[in-house]
Amino acid sequence: RYRDPAAEEKMNPFAEQEAWEEHQIGKATLKFGSKDKKQKYDDYEFVFEDQIEFIKAAVMDGVNVEQELSVQSPTASSAKTAFEKLQSDRKTLPVYPYREELLRAVNDHQILVIVGETGSGKTTQIPQYLHEAGYTSRGKIGCTQPRRVAAMSVAARVSQEMGVKLGHEVGYSIRFEDCTSEKTILKYMTDGMLLREFLGEPDLASYSVVMVDEAHERTLSTDILFGLVKVRFCSSLLCSKLMLQESSSLLNIRLLVSYFVGKDIARFRPDLKLLISSATLDAEKFSDYFDSAPIFKIPGRRFPVDIHYTKAPEADYLDAAIVTALQIHVTQPPGDGDILIFLTGQEEIETAEETLKHRTRGLGTKIAELIICPIYANLPTELQAKIFEPTPEGARKVVLATNIAETSLTIDGIKYVIDPGFVKMKSYNPRTGMESLLVTPISKASANQRAGRSGRTGPGKCFRLYTAYNYYNDLDDNTVPEIQRTNLANVVLSLKSLGINDLLNFDFMDPPPSEALLKALELLYALSALNKHGELTKVGRRMAEFPLDPMLSKMIVASDKYQCSDEVISIAAMLSIGNSIFYRPKDKQVHADNARLNFHMGNVGDHMALLKVYSSWKDTNFSTQWCYENYIQVRSMKRARDIRDQLEGLLERVEIELTANPNDLDAIKKAITSGFFPHSAKLQKNGSYRTVKHPQTVHIHPSSGLAQVLPRWVVYHELVLTTKEYMRQVTELKPEWLVEIAPHYYQLKDVEDLASKKMPRGEGRAIKD
Ligand code: CDP
Ligand code: MG
């Protein structure tokens, strides 16, 4: 509706009033980004500037803004100015002068690598340019982002720039949340979602352009996408590669043959444009991988950044970061720039937030206000919008961010960056199959990206809380790509269901360790997703339909056999939320703990407790009040409900009936065990546990309902390494189930010292396809 300002001016004022009132009626269900905004809203001082802010807040809040946007602004002229301002802002971005040249390059080449500093307009502008140049008449433009938050916020921004409703022409798609429609032509999505779309649409027929953005992040999904688009769409590459290294890759020959015999010829898409965009300058690697694809460089406009190192290593980087931030704040004039601190995770950010609040309290009124803005992936979405709000005059903002702010999000107005030099990173031990999140030193490339965040709008300063010696001698040049440090079971299952069988010869940009691939194959075989020839089974095909970890998918598929799919999808949905279900306010810890323990009554185990939380909430007709009373995060519950609804839909797709079996605890536990039997552990004399298959000492996480109970045998959802290796989400298990459910994985001797003799006859067989 921004599209015809002239018509807006002529608008009937009464129609406006009606729309407004209609809106007022609908308003009751909306949450607002901040009280102050609501105030303005109620007072009818609603101008467009606010509306844009409001949309941003509402979008972040997950509110359906469709209805909101149908309200006409009382002042059409201010609407025009705001929209025009957005348009003129677009023209100031570094990418703008290169618009024509870029479009020519896209026209001339199937694959193009695009390089430009963060903030140069790659993500928001390039898809719009392509749309304006007519590419969307042939299909959608898809743009992938490694992070959900980035996909959502960028889509919101672009929908404003184009003057359309989010979810209509411009939309986003992230796991369990699809904000797109039939109309959508610019689709921002997580890279994982595009990977899933491949499963349903192997030729990506509905796309005219795919832009793999933030390629330098080298997430697992991005890397797999690279491999897939390369084999699927780039025939010229395939041929030239074959000529170069005729005998090398059996896979390529086979693919070529299948193209020529016609089966795959329809999939071959010379018209699909592939853009790979990256914020780092070492794009040659991408270019080499795509057979010397041309590189398009957008010259940056980076201001000089002063880099400061500490003289000696910091013993406590969190404290050092806080002290540095406060020093900047009190010594530098207010209004000269905001501060960005890179921390490793939610917990650290919350600690820093509290400490900062505490220490600024005593500063008195002479010192300017310090606005603290945390940002991390699990931050409630409406709070995420806060970091984009302009800093009020006379105040200073300090953004406490995870790596998310390194390149994915551009925050305007940052002048000071504080970089402790750490990141929380996934690491994987293929020998044991254990995955853990570890705080690790960053790479030089990361350190430089972080420093660059301070020089976007003017000269900046970066305070590295490590020594220059550390930087030059201890940091790796680049971050190891995720594919080389992660569990690959999920990816292998996806590739298998795409018909890619020869994974050892798949053309990865950086191949994963073959040990990790084998481990993944082994796990999928154990879960009966693959047969002994490594081919997908019927169970595997069903599992691949679920956008979940294979063990969770298997648990759901197995629930069919135990007639408890209704309960099991609730458990799966609750497990997918992570550990943000219960909350524990500092002043009411005892109450909160009691409320939580209520759900553990009878020592049913954590999975059952999660189920009980969900069912009780459902029994209250999804009451918010009930959540408050029980110290449960209503937002997490709503998300669980959404996920559960989608899982229910997927059940139908794989033809599993929704059956409830709430009173048969063993049936539910057996379904859980069918997915998680590789995660079994046995109690030791000293109160620790020993994992059964790859013996390792582990402990029950203190937050578990079974932490004091210590059952002899347990099955766990995941391991987390903090001070010890902890099992999180634990349920008691009868050891004979292991042999009953997974006789190909466990033998009697593994569970022998217990009641194996009691095992009923005839039950010791695997679940067949
Ligand atoms: O992708 P790249 O880092 O090159 O830049 P971008 O994300 O397209 O951002 C271009 C500009 O759009 C930034 O400088 C921001 O000022 C603005 N932007 C915004 O205001 N809000 C967003 N959610 C995203 C971008
Ligand atoms: Mg970007």
Image (cartoon, rainbow, N blue to C red):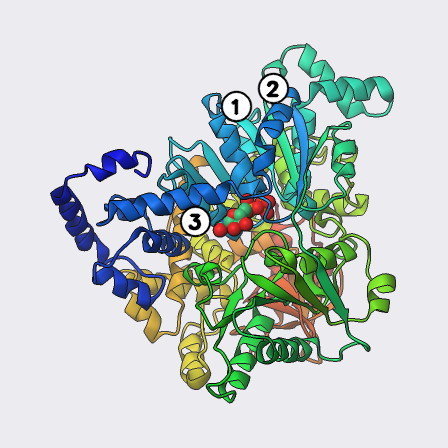
What residue is drawn where x is 48% and y is 45%?
89
The residue identified by callout 3 is 565
Residue linked to disc 2 = 269
Query: How far apart in space, not on screen, are marks 1 and 3 (Cα)?
Result: 34 Å
The residue closer to the viewer here, 623 or 361, is 361
Task: Name the amino acid type tagged 1.
Answer: Ala
Q: Is residue 419 above or below residue 233?
A: below
Q: Earlier in the sequence, mark 2 or mark 1?
A: 1
Q: Is residue 175 visible?
A: no
Q: Amino acid at mark 2?
A: Arg
Whole-percent x and y of residue 182? Answer: 38, 31
Say which residue appears at 44% left-offset and 35% top-offset: 653
Q: From the viewer's perspective, is residue 94 above or below residue 480?
A: above
| Label 2 to label 1: alpha-carbon separation | 8 Å
SS for dot 1: loop
> Can you tell which mark lies on residue 77?
none
Read off the residue under disc 1: 205
Q: Quadrant of residue 510?
A: top right
Q: Depth check: 614 or 276 in front?
A: 276
